[in-house]
DNA sequence: CCTTCCAGATACTAACGGTATCTGGAATAG
DNA sequence: CTATTCCAGATACCGTTAGTATCTGGAAGG
């Protein structure tokens, strides 16, 4: 317990560093090749460790993926919040959000991972509930953004913001899932549906 | 080549029967437990064969699943077409379709299989294109139904029927994917969005 | 300085998709 | 009717993978 932690590479710090490296490498591989197609051996190897390091830091492959998804969600939320913060008018904000969604759905590696892991999670009630918990958070965040837009601009909406968020998230998942199989899918319907939901004329 | 095929259990007939049995058993297991969680050994065993029978009738696990999906789609299309044939007015037809979708999304074993296999198909360009081909057919069928509704009832629609079909299919996929993880998801937004797409007031 | 402890390495198992090979009996030729 | 061919399905095997059990080197702590 050094008073001044100079160069204090404690055991806990080293482990946290290992954990972070594993998450970073796993995120890259899961996004590039998918969950099932990425072996834990390869994650460990590319991170410069052995598989033992993985199982020492995560209960199993699923827990590693949950950690990866958390690290992704953190970044996504930052992006969307920033897009809203950097714009003032309703139209600009909607356009910024549409652009963000178009970008995500256009190269849907993230959506694909989310959907694939959802299929895996289905096998285990615990993992399913953990993933559902995260989906609920995302829906809540979208609903809050919708509330801001609706209140701010005095537009009319024909369903609750929670329901509208469910529609948008489902639409994003479904479009991304199809887009990862068929690049010709028309992703523009996302923005169109969004405008229609909040009672705006088609752009 | 008997003129009267009495009791003609030819080799081709036996193989077709084997193939049909395998598809039937695989459909039950894939729907109950998922694609990855169902081993070919188990499919063969429960069908009363060995794994050799599977590989003698299908190129691999993916081709077996494509055959299973085809057999499912056949039944689904029959159901929807019948629902339309059995009703006359726009409202009745929409309600029948909503009820069908609610039933499918409420116990989303089929949607879950479709989505899980989509993730698998992503690994192989050939399988991906085969699956995308089927999705395109489904979208076309939905678009055709929308055309009938729109023309028949003289309602207005703010996007092409192809785009509306894309929205509905994506929404169904996304809702089903979430529903299979979280039974509290509000599935009623499917019908609400559908009505809104074709310019009808909320029911 | 010596003991304890644990992050990570190593060695293993079971399960799975897929391949190679074999075989018994139906199909066909003579 | 007999002999030969052929192939649907069985059997035996392989490589890969998630997961488990065990070990070890070096930091933590007395």
Image (cartoon, coloured by chain):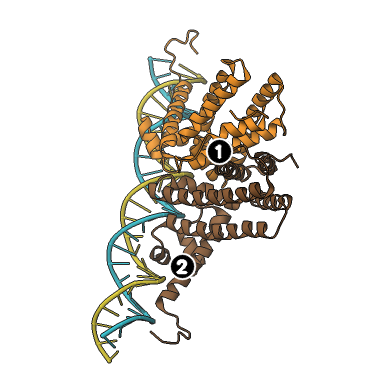
Chain colours: A brown, B orange, C yellow, D cyan
Tell me, for residue B173, which label it has, or none.
Answer: 1
Residue at left offset 58%, top offset 57%: A77
Q: Nearer the viewer, residue D14 or A47?
A: A47
Residue at left offset 56%, top offset 52%: A141
Q: Nearer the viewer, residue B137 or B18?
A: B137
Q: Where does label 2 land, which residue?
A: A19
Secondary structure category for the residue under label 2: helix
Which quadrant is the N terminus of chain A positioned in? Answer: bottom left
In the image, are marks 1 and 2 on the same chain? no
Task: Count neighbours of disc 1 (C-alpha within 10 A) and say few if under 14, some if 14 to 19, many if 20 or more.
Answer: many
The residue most toward the right is A203
Taking the image as drawn, is residue B134 in sight? no
Using the image, determine if residue A185 lies above or below residue A152: above
Q: Nearer the viewer, residue B177 or A163?
A: A163
Is B47 on the left or on the right of A45, as rendered?
Answer: left
Whole-percent x, y for residue B141 in the image: 63, 27
Q: How many marks?
A: 2
Secondary structure category for the residue under label 1: helix
Taking the image as drawn, is residue B14 in sight? yes
Q: Are marks 1 and 2 in contact (CB under 8 Å)?
A: no
Task: Count neighbours of disc 2 (C-alpha within 10 A) and say few if under 14, some if 14 to 19, many if 20 or more.
Answer: some
Residue at left offset 49%, top offset 61%: A42
Which quadrant is the C terminus of chain A positioned in? Answer: top right
Is B151 on the left or on the right of B39, as rendered?
Answer: right
Residue B52 position by quadrant: top left
Q: Chain of mark 2?
A: A
Residue A9 position by quadrant: bottom left
Residue C10 position by quadrant: bottom left
Whole-percent x, y for residue B85 in the image: 59, 16
Is A6 on the left or on the right of B41, as rendered?
Answer: right
């Amino acid at each position: 317990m050094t008073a001044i932690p100079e160069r204090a590479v404690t055991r806990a710090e080293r482990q946290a560093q290992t954990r972070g490296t594993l998450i970073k490498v796993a995120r890259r591989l899961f996004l590039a090749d998918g969950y099932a197609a990425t072996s834990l051996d390869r994650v460990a190897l590319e991170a410069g460790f052995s598989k033992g390091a993985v199982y020492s830091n995560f209960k199993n492959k699923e827990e590693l993926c949950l950690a990866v998804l958390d690290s992704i969600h953190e970044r996504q939320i930052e992006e969307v919040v920033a897009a809203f913060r950097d714009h003032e008018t309703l139209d600009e904000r909607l356009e910024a959000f549409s652009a963000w969604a178009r970008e995500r759905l256009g190269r849907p590696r993230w959506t694909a991972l989310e959907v694939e892991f959802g299929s895996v999670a289905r096998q285990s009630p615990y993992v399913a509930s953990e993933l559902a918990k995260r989906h609920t958070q995302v829906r809540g965040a979208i609903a809050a953004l919708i509330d801001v837009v609706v209140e701010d601009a005095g537009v009319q909406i024909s369903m609750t913001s929670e329901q509208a968020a469910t529609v948008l998230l489902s639409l994003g998942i479904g479009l991304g899932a199809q887009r990862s199989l068929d690049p010709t899918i028309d992703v523009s319907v996302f923005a169109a549906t969004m405008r229609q939901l909040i009672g705006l004329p088609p752009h």
